[in-house]
Image (cartoon, rainbow, N blue to C red):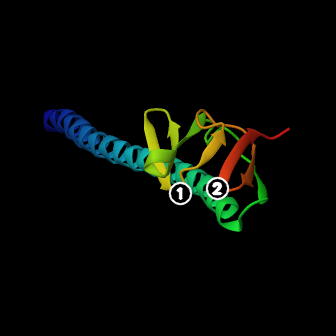
């Protein structure tokens, strides 16, 4: 009977060792999954920011290429899908529209460098109009 008591203690220690190893494995697996989820959310944020910048640049190019008298309205929410605020700035010398959020940015190419009106901190819906090749930008009313 003495041997049975020693075996019970050994079984408890073996169980604790195996349980500890399994817990370490599952914790590592959990942190890996959380890391992948955060990466996917970050990539989704970048893709949405890119689509907003490309939409704005595309509308600017459309109004420019349509010629004198062309008008368009661009609906901008000012926030990404996850609620983070963004703003758009136009850099005529670089032929670029840049969308800024948090500490990141994305730039999209535009065809013209002739603008008047709003050029920085655009984060709401705007009206675009072509007046003799100069794109006028004003907040929509």
Of residues 16 and 33, the one nearer the viewer is 33
Residue at horizontal 61%, vertical 41%? 82
Q: Quadrant of the C terminus?
A: top right
Q: Quadrant of the N terminus?
A: top left
Left or right, 26 with reference to 85: left
Vertical placement of residue 135 versus 63, above or below? above
Residue 42 at least partly seen: no
Of residues 90 and 12, the one nearer the viewer is 90
Rendered location of residue 63, percent (x, y): 70, 60
Left or right, 116 with reference to 42: right
Residue 138 falls in image quadrant: top right
Rendered location of residue 113, percent (x, y): 53, 51
Residue at horizontal 79%, vertical 56%? 71
Residue at horizontal 21%, vertical 38%? 17
Rendered location of residue 73, percent (x, y): 78, 52
Of residues 100 and 135, the one nearer the viewer is 135
Label 1, residues with CA under 10 Å away: few <14, some 14-19, many ≥20: many
Residue at horizontal 53%, vertical 57%? 110
Q: Which residue is mark 2?
A: 60
Q: Which residue is mark 1?
A: 110
Q: Secondary structure at mark 1?
A: loop
Calculate the distance from the C-alpha at mark 1 to the C-alpha at mark 2.
7 Å
Q: Residue furthest right?
A: 141
Question: Along the polypeptide, which appears first: circle 1 or circle 2?
Answer: 2
Q: Secondary structure at mark 2?
A: helix
Q: Are marks 1 and 2 in contact (CB under 8 Å)?
A: yes
Left or right, 119 with reference to 131: left
Of residues 140 and 47, the one nearer the viewer is 140
């Amino acid at each position: 009977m003495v041997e049975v008591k020693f075996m019970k203690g050994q079984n408890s220690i073996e169980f604790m060792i195996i349980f500890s190893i399994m817990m370490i494995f599952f914790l590592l697996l959990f942190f890996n999954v959380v890391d992948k989820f955060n990466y996917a959310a970050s990539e989704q944020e970048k893709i949405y920011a890119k689509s907003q910048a490309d939409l704005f640049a595309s509308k600017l190019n459309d109004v420019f290429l349509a010629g004198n008298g062309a008008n368009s309205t661009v609906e901008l929410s000012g926030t990404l899908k996850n609620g983070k605020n963004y703003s758009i700035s136009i850099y005529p010398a670089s032929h670029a529209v840049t969308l800024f959020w948090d500490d990141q940015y994305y730039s999209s190419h535009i065809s013209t460098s002739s603008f008047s009106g709003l050029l920085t901190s655009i984060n709401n819906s705007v009206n675009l109009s072509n007046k003799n090749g100069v794109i006028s930008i004003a907040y929509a009313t």
